[in-house]
Amino acid sequence: MLIQTDEKKMDSSEKINNLISNLEKAIIGKRECLKLVVAGLIARGHILIEDVPGVGKTTLARALAKSLDCKFRRIQFTPDMLPSDIIGISVFQQENGDFSFRKGPIFSNIVLADEINRATPRTQSSLLEAMNDYQVSVDGITYQLPNPFVVMATQNPVEFEGTFPLPESQLDRFLLRVSIGYPTIDDEAKVMTGYSFKNIVDELTPVLKPEDVISLQNDAENILISESLVQYILNISDMTRKSELIELGVSPRGNLAFYKAVKAYALVEGRNYCIPDDIKKLTVPVLAHRIIPKGSGLYGDTENSSKILKDILSSIPVPE
């Protein structure tokens, strides 16, 4: 495995710091959350933002797209939405007597699936191929999605009426589940006193280009992770499979996501190697939505999942 040069490391760190600083202009006081989102982007993953209304979920997705000079589309999920509303549809052309494919909003770099759990399972499933294989198939023809490609989905963890919970197979395709949370009083005061009738996202200027994102993603692949840390990841996931408190443990796909996210987070922190704290930091965001505690309700229990994972972390020796 290649070791990055200091010059390359500085270049990557500068890009990441510029991106996070730009995002902080729109999302104040949530640097740790922004670092997780950027790590998800670098790890070529998709992100589920689970939080109450009004804390900036949509703003975060728009700010990320604007900061990257990427094509952005927002899809408002509703119960009457069809898969063709997302993927696209073949339209008959009378002039040549043939069908042509009109691409849907999924053909964007950053796709915001707003309130994803309000769409029916049939519509939700239309995202599976795109999220897993970065392509969509229509009428026997496969279309590649743009690079980079990230789905940022939102859902309200409180309001369940008229919603369709995401199945485990779809949750497993989200690399990270993050929560923005309420701001502190001081940060909320900054938001209020700095308020303008102009949309803050519209005032943002791009700090990176799509090719910069691809470069960072390639850099993350070269981050060093020791055998002891790989074993640490495996021990954590193995405990989720053996725990008497868990009905469904972490899948091999979840392990691979964990591995990729840890390497990307080390890059976000400005290092070309991973440390145990990276794994501790990522355990809940990467794994909590992938396990099902015994006795959890229809919508799962992310709070209980987080507690169980923290208990597992405390019971496993940390590599030196």
Image (cartoon, grey):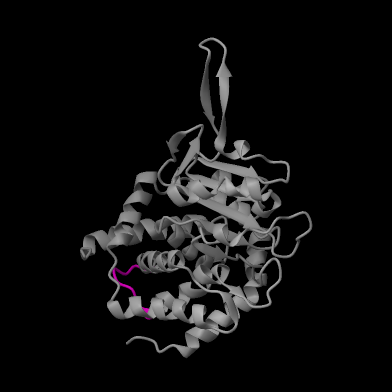
Judge whether residue 275 is colored magenta: yes
Residue at position x 40%, y 48% from top? 208
Report x, y in % for residue 203: 55, 45
Residue 246 appears in view: yes
Report x, y in % for residue 26: 57, 55
Report x, y in % for residue 166: 63, 58
Residue at position x 55%, y 38% from top? 87
Position of 159 compared to 60: left or right?
right
Position of 29 compared to 159: left or right?
left
Residue pushed farthest top?
A: 95
Judge whether residue 121 is colored magenta: no
Q: How many marks?
A: 0
**Depth check, front residue: 55 or 72:** 72
Residue at position x 51%, y 84% from top? 312
Residue at position x 30%, y 58% from top? 219
Q: What span is colored magenta in the figure?
A: 269-276
Where's the C terminus, which quadrant?
bottom left
**Depth check, front residue: 130 or 192:** 130
Residue pushed farthest right?
A: 161
Name the magenta segment's main secondary structure.
loop
Residue 135 sits above or below residue 101 on the image:
below
